[in-house]
Image (cartoon, grey):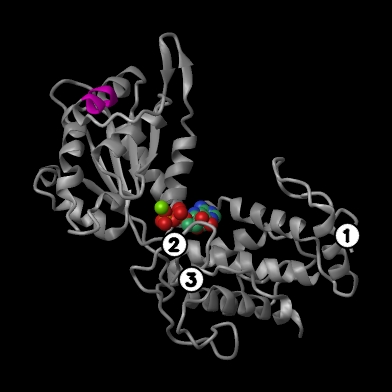
Amino acid sequence: MDEHTHEGIGSEGGLSPVPDSIAAILKQHGADRPIRNPDEVAGLVKQLRKVMVPHERFREGILRLRTIHAGLDRSPAAEAGVMTFLGRSGSGKSNTLRYYARQYPARKGESGWIRPVVYVRVPPEANKAALLRSILSEMGLPVTNARDTDILMRDVLHHLREQKVELLILDEMQHLIDQRTQRFQYISADILKDLLSSNCCQMVFAGLDSAIMALEVNPQLNRRSPLRFPMTEYNWFDEEDQGNYVDFLTAVADQMPFQRRPAVDDVDVAERLHRSSDGLIGITMNLVAKGMEYALFEGAATVTLEHLAVGFDELKRRGIKINPFRGKCPDTLGVPVDYIYEEDSGLSKRKERPVRASFSK
Ligand SMILES: Nc1ncnc2c1ncn2[C@@H]1O[C@H](COP(=O)(O)OP(=O)(O)O)[C@@H](O)[C@H]1O
Ligand SMILES: [Mg+2]
């Protein structure tokens, strides 16, 4: 049993100390079971989740972002270049976009801040004003309640120029779709059109396939026929893609803190992971992280198929009866195309933590 029950190991400050009452329970619990300190396990899992793997689609995405970025042309006759960046939820779009933006941090220039790349996450159920306020906020401007979209737009254009923004990335564009009418254009197309015609900077619109396709056919915008990067999930039945998926798992396995390196990149295990995730990076990471969590709790030397199986059962969607980590690998399992990956959540929402009964062998 670890002695450090009182400390929030693995948390970067900020985590409150464990109260004595909880510490006593944890200690008792640990006395007859080989449980690891839960704070330590959580810290290790968190670390794994932060690992950035430069997988194939990621590298391709970065290359395409660099291309659209480099296409900036501020001459008066030029028009802003646009690229759409689309893919299923959990395919790794936001991670790639945020990584790219981080490589161009804001710096203090002679006449104020210079921000080469601005990444904006469109807030849920955003209207025009909310979208414009988000852009201003990402440019380091004070958050306001302003609602006048004309004034907000003028401010956005002004600061995009002032801060010498070269590339503006709007992510989670599906949040601009009107939930009731599914209509995209009335909410935001005119704003996007204003941004484009002002030619302040190059633009990337990212989000779910459906939203981006609606955007691409929008009559106000489609005259521009944007460049397009689909961040597709990995296809197991394409030899090269399968190799790319396995490479991703190899990079993840290398980061896992076990006595024996977990064989998650073994072809048999990889195929099972693929079947459970449809080759989506997000679901794959959830499963691997969950398997790792169970293995750590158990004090196991490595992550086994059984750890992944238990993890799958915890994360799986309602109604799924088979477990691809037990027995023969199923031919199909399928993840609905409209499945929404939520950060730090599983395949389905669960309110309570699982009980540890499933650890017993
Ligand atoms: N390059 C990467 N390396 C490691 N894990 C990644 C990478 N990209 C994505 N992930 C994992 O997948 C999850 C979903 O990625 P995200 O970019 O949010 O997908 P999307 O925006 O397409 O829905 C992330 O939370 C992370 O766990
Ligand atoms: Mg995203």
Residue 55 visible in the snapshot: no
Q: Is mark 2 within 8 Å of ligand 1?
A: yes
Residue displayed at 40% across by 27% down: 139
User: Which is more N-terminal, label 3 or label 1?
Assistant: 1
Q: Find disc 2 in the rendering and name its residue.
A: 341
The correct choice, above or below, for 324 with respect to 261 in the image is below
Residue appearing at x 67%, y 76% in the figure? 307
Say left or right for 269 vs 224.
Answer: right
User: Is 39 on the left-hand or right-hand side of 206?
Assistant: right
Total marks shown come to 3
State the image coordinates of residue 42 (x, y, percent, origin top left).
70, 57
Q: Quadrant of the C terminus?
A: bottom right
Query: Which mark lies nearer to you, 2 or 3?
Result: 3
- The residue where tag 1 is placed is 2
Instruction: Work out whether mark 2 precedes mark 1 in sequence or the reverse, and give the earlier one.
Output: 1
Relative image position of residue 276 (x, y in whole percent)? 49, 76
The three-letter code of the residue at mark 2 reads Tyr
